[in-house]
Amino acid sequence: MNCMLILRSILAATIAAALAVVAPLATAAEYPDRPIGVTVAYGAGGATDFQARIVTMMSAQEDYLGQPIYIVNKPGAGGQRGWNDFVTRAKPDGYELAAYNVPHFIAQSIAFPDKVKYNIDNLEPIANWGADPAVLIVPNDSPFDSAADLVEYARGNPGKLTVNGAGKFVGHHIAFLQFAKATGAEMTYVPHPKGGAGALKDVMGGQVKAGFNNLSDAFRSQANLKVLAVADLERHEFLPDVPTLREQGIDVDDSSVNFRGIMAPAGTPPEIVAFLAERVPEMFNNKRRVAKKMKDGGSPLRVLGRDEVAAMWRERQTYLTDLLAGLTE
């Protein structure tokens, strides 16, 4: 009798173990069976929000994810509010994803290690959709017509040149820090609480004298501002007449270029990550609708797969650690 009980116990344990292995696979095989949310850590109408809605609009098609994606905006503190919420609250089940911005979240994890909860080790890269350089902008009626004009004013009026951006240690801020260091001029950075869209409006309205903002946003708002320079190594095809800062004798490289894509929280089942890593780049590469809408909106498209994004994250982590050690606010 005791032998029978032992056999039954062993059999029950074996079945339970088998089910424990099979259950996650069955769940993954059904994924996704409902809409997927993507947190955007910036406000509605900004470049990240605008582009995220374009690159995910085809997700419901069976060739891609087979379920719609909806956007959840959680702006604040240059992305910190949204990303902190994401890594501490999101379930690792594939139904809660987020848009990333690099260098933003990596630079913030370096600059504020005790304040932010996110870093490259507790997030899973899925795919990258774009790379958006920072540009130096002024109001349309500004007396400044070049980066040199701004520098001359700043040197003659220490601290009075106000330059805004989407937040602290985002791409805009990094471009500002490099700009200030390269020129040796004393100027004041003004982080906007509502991100890039709010910062852009303040530049156009004359609340600040200048700003660093996204090339894509500036491209769509050319009638209301002047773009003085691009913070990249080369001129951009969308604004071919705008010189780089380096062309104007100011040593600012491409460290502030804003890479954007989709990520998942750490702990997401590897089979779900693999599914997303296969399908999401294909969705971003849709030429008929996604690529056309991105180009029409002045939004640079640069699609990278999961492995390429992971390598980019690691490279930026190393590079930004060195860069930020040599810059001050």
Image (spheres, grey):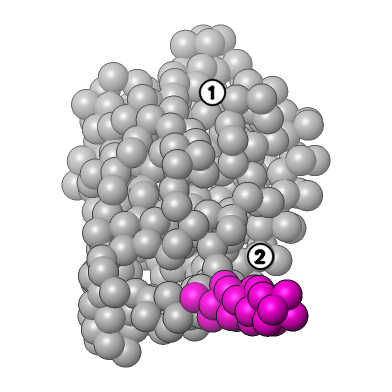
Report which quarter residue 50 is drawn in.
bottom left
Question: Magenta stretch containing residue 46, yes or no?
Answer: no
Nearest the camera: 159 or 155?
159
Q: Residue at x 63, y 50 (%)?
A: 122
Magenta residues span: 1-23
Nearest the camera: 257 or 122?
122
Q: Residue at x 35, y 35 (%)?
A: 75
**Percent x, y of residue 322:** 80, 40
Q: Residue at x 61, y 67 (%)?
A: 309
Q: Amino acid at mark 2?
A: Ala
**Percent x, y of residue 208:** 35, 21
Give the main secondary structure, helix, strand or loop, of the magenta stretch.
helix
Nearest the camera: 326 or 277?
277
Please identify the quadrant where the N terminus is shown.
bottom right
Relative to residue 94, is residue 120 drawn left or right? right
- Whether residue 177 is visible, yes or no, is yes
Which residue does the numbered mark 2 point to in the structure image? 310
Q: Between tags 2 and 1, which lies in front?
A: 2
Q: Which mark is residue 152?
A: 1
Q: CA distance from mark 2 to mark 1?
A: 41 Å
Report which quarter residue 119 is drawn in.
top right
Relative to residue 83, is residue 117 drawn left or right? right
Secondary structure type for disc 1: helix
Q: Amino acid at mark 1?
A: Glu
**With respect to residue 173, does 104 lie above or below?**
below
